[in-house]
Image (tube, coloured by chain):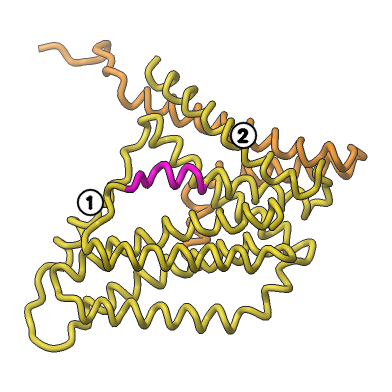
């Protein structure tokens, strides 16, 4: 496996893991107050719909590898990645409160409240369907963007599938929010990797050549890690001054 | 989904414009005859500089928000 394929698989896995984890938190919160049947049905329906959408859109993926489209994809991944990394740096340096999955879980539980009527709970099913669709579409977009280059589609898709499997196993085993996972650290890593991919694709789309070819990707990841760690120190010092 | 993409720009248009500006600068450098192998790293450096400046601005805004208010214009009595 090449460096680029390994990095694509890892990036897709981490990004998908964070998104699925957010969906899982909401589904678990709904299930704990309204029963499990409806939210599980909503989740299942959303996963089937997502699979159908990805299958239908698959022929379009080859089109993503062309020059101008690669530039557009690169810029979008860059916008995504820098936004994630900015928030992760803000959280790490105390400019923004840490994202709290446990608080999100409690908030959703309060919003939904206990079911009041007997029968199939449409509101619970719709809530689960909506959140899984929103997070799932984001995953589909990230996987399509990361896997846009020839040969990177399968490792990116495998990374996302592994993340979904892991989140489903964790959800089934724990039945409560996975608050112990350091989510900001994951988002930090995903931000760094998306910035590396975004910079690489944008450069390629513009017609620039990267020294070392695909080896520039791990180098860019290290570069963005150094930039992010440096900005955490800078932001912490500036805010405290 | 469309709303999510729009949010990428709408959240902070200046930040998005800065990123697009960096890409435009790298494209201009290529157009002006800068070597292809320099343009890629140049893009990365421009983006890193923009990112650092934005985070510095975020920290300054945060500091101002939490600074004690001036008593200069407070009404007496």
Q: Colour of chain B?
A: orange
Residue A54, given in percent of the width and then of the height, sits at 55, 78
Residue A154, given in percent of the width and then of the height, sits at 63, 68
Label for residue A195?
Answer: none
Q: Chain of mark 2?
A: B
Q: Residue furthest bottom?
A: A119
Q: Tell me the distance, in whole angstroms, between the alpha carbons under discs 1 and 2.
A: 34 Å
Left/right of residue B32 with respect to residue A91 in the rendered view: right
Q: Residue furthest right?
A: B33
Q: Residue at the location (36% across, 83% down)?
A: A45
In the rendered structure, does residue A187 fall within the stretch colored magenta?
yes
Residue A51, given in percent of the width and then of the height, sits at 49, 80
Q: Chain of mark 1?
A: A
Q: Residue at the location (79% across, 51% down)?
A: A206
Residues in magenta, as a range: A181-190
Q: Colour of chain A?
A: yellow
Taking depth in this image into account, of B70 and A133 the one nearest to the observer is A133
Q: Which residue is mark 2?
A: B50
Taking depth in this image into account, of B75 and B24 the one nearest to the observer is B24
């Amino acid at each position: 496996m090449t460096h680029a394929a390994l990095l694509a698989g890892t990036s897709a896995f981490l990004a998908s893991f964070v998104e699925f984890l957010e969906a899982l938190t909401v589904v678990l919160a709904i299930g704990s107050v309204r029963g499990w049947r409806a939210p599980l049905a909503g989740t299942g329906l959303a996963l089937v719909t997502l699979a159908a959408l990805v299958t239908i859109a698959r022929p379009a993926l080859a089109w993503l590898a062309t020059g101008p489209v690669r530039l557009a994809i690169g810029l979008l991944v860059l916008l995504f990645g820098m936004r994630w990394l900015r928030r992760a740096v803000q959280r790490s340096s105390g400019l923004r409160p840490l994202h709290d999955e446990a608080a999100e879980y409690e908030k959703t539980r309060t919003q939904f409240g206990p079911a009041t009527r007997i029968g199939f709970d449409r509101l619970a099913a719709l809530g689960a369907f909506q959140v899984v669709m929103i997070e799932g579409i984001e995953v589909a977009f990230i996987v399509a963007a990361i896997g846009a280059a020839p040969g990177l589609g399968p490792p990116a898709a495998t990374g996302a599938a592994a993340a979904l499997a892991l989140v489903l196993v964790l959800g089934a085993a724990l039945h409560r929010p996975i608050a112990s996972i350091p989510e900001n650290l994951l988002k930090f890593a995903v931000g760094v990797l998306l910035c590396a991919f975004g910079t690489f694709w944008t450069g390629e789309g513009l017609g620039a050549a990267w020294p070392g070819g695909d080896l520039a990707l791990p180098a860019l990841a290290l570069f963005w890690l150094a930039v992010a760690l440096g900005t955490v120190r800078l932001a912490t010092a500036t805010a405290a001054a | 989904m469309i709303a999510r993409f729009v949010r990428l720009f709408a959240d902070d248009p200046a930040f998005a414009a800065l990123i697009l500006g960096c890409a435009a600068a790298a494209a201009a450098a290529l157009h002006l005859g800068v070597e292809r192998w320099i343009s890629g790293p140049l893009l990365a450096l421009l983006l890193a500089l923009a990112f650092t400046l934005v985070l510095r601005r975020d920290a300054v805004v945060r500091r101002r928000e939490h600074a004690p208010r001036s008593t200069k214009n407070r009404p007496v009595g």
